[in-house]
Image (cartoon, helix red, strand yellow):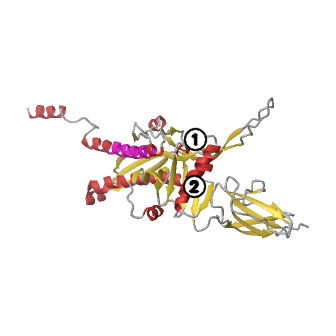
Amino acid sequence: MKKDKMKDLQVFAAPVNVTGDAQIQVRAREIDFVTSFGKNMQALLDVMGITRMIRKENGSVLKTKKVTGVLQSGDVAEGDEIPMSQYAVEETEFDSIRIAKYRKGVSLEAIAEKGYEAAVALTDEEFKSDLQNVVTDKFYNQLKLGSLVGHESTWQMAVAMAIGRVKDKFKKMKRTATGVAVWVNTLDVYKYIGAADITIQTAFGMDYIKNFLGADIVFVSSEIPENTVVATPLNNLVAYYVDPADSEFVKAGLSYTTDPATGFIGFHAQGNYDRAISDMFAIMGVRLFAEYLDAIAHISVGGSDTQTLGKLTVKSEAGSEAGKTKLTVEPQSASIRNIYKYKTNASQASEVTYGMDVKTWPKWDGKSEVAATAGHHITVVEADQNYKAIRSGGVVADVNPGE
């Protein structure tokens, strides 16, 4: 009889690998993580007026664009042929978008000492915040490469001119700015408003003010240097992502929980029994991106209405071949998008002013030896991608005389 009772109990025992309360809690934690991240990201996209994320394949190349062309005169005599205005969009490879992998672990000892809430839940929040910063940091780095430079004597005028410059740029590109986003330093905002009452909101870790100083949205950040204003049209901004729920990943046994409404990030939690650690894994490929770098304005603020040309220290030594000189410059280029131009002159260094167009000057890659005449002056210019001078320096050429 006793044996029969034991047999009956086995009939009602839980099946092996059944989904129980512990598994449900882990799944709920994963869903909460990806849903929260997705909602935060979507809130920022809504603020920026980005209606949808554009899906990209892992490793896709991201390209910036530049519109070139001139509107021909419309003053045409009767019967004469109307001149054609031609415009072209030049694309330049800027970066690539690919899945990045992240991991966080919490030890059994930490959970025992501090409790689940402190050891796991709170560190999940910090983990999520750091992942958000990965996205915004890359975006800020791109904003800093904008080439619509200028200088104003007051901070308020700098904001106004930044807005004006990007609207004017889009107009010349035959596009209409749907709105303008401005980025300013946190301290600059509070210096300006003093004790005034303003409402600062936050989306995806970015603080912003709506309809402020003529801009549709003003982002307030310590990532922007003091006395600097950055602006771009809202419709210059796009968002890309690599789907973390890619079926190829799942086939390989790498299944991550994703938010079906957004799909920005994949998250998975599991116990590592070998080390008694609660492991958390996240994968994502998310990029906020400005399509046109030459539609990003950088306006600096100071006591002068004239922007100062930066200084380059240029050195010359005899090259490895006859008639060649080896040039070096310090400091190195401030941006990967900037280029070097140079010019030789027999009697004196060429005069350069800030913003001067040096497009017709010969290009130098920063390392190759250049042909020169001994005793002639060589002027080197660091220019932005629109060939506008930013920094300059000169040297008297030391040339290999040959045999």
Q: Residue furthest left?
A: 1
Q: Residues within 10 Å of mark 1 (few under 14, many from 20)?
A: some
Q: Residue furthest right?
A: 403
Rendering coords of residue 331 (x, y %): 66, 67
Is 44 magenta? The answer is: yes
Rendering coords of residue 249 (x, y %): 47, 38
**Towards the viewer: 100 or 5:** 100
**Towards the viewer: 181 or 17:** 181
Is the residue 284 above or below the residue 352 in the image? above
Q: Residue 161: give its label.
A: 2
In the rendered image, the quadrant that contains the C terminus is bottom right
Q: Secondary structure under badge 1?
A: loop
Amino acid type, residue under disc 2 in the picture = Met
What is the C-alpha distance between the residues marked 2 and 1? 17 Å
Q: Residues within 10 Å of mark 2 (few under 14, many from 20)?
A: many
> Main structural element of the magenta stretch: helix, strand or loop?
helix
Q: Residue at x 46, y 63 (%)?
A: 192
Is residue 297 visible in this depiction of the protein? yes
Rendering coords of residue 304 (x, y %): 61, 67
Is residue 368 visible in this depiction of the protein? no
Picture quarter containing residue 369? bottom right
| Left or right: 367 in relation to 235 | right
Amino acid type, residue under disc 1 in the picture = Thr
What's the magenta region? 29-45
**Towards the viewer: 241 or 230:** 230
Picture quarter containing residue 91? top right
Picture quarter containing residue 316? bottom right
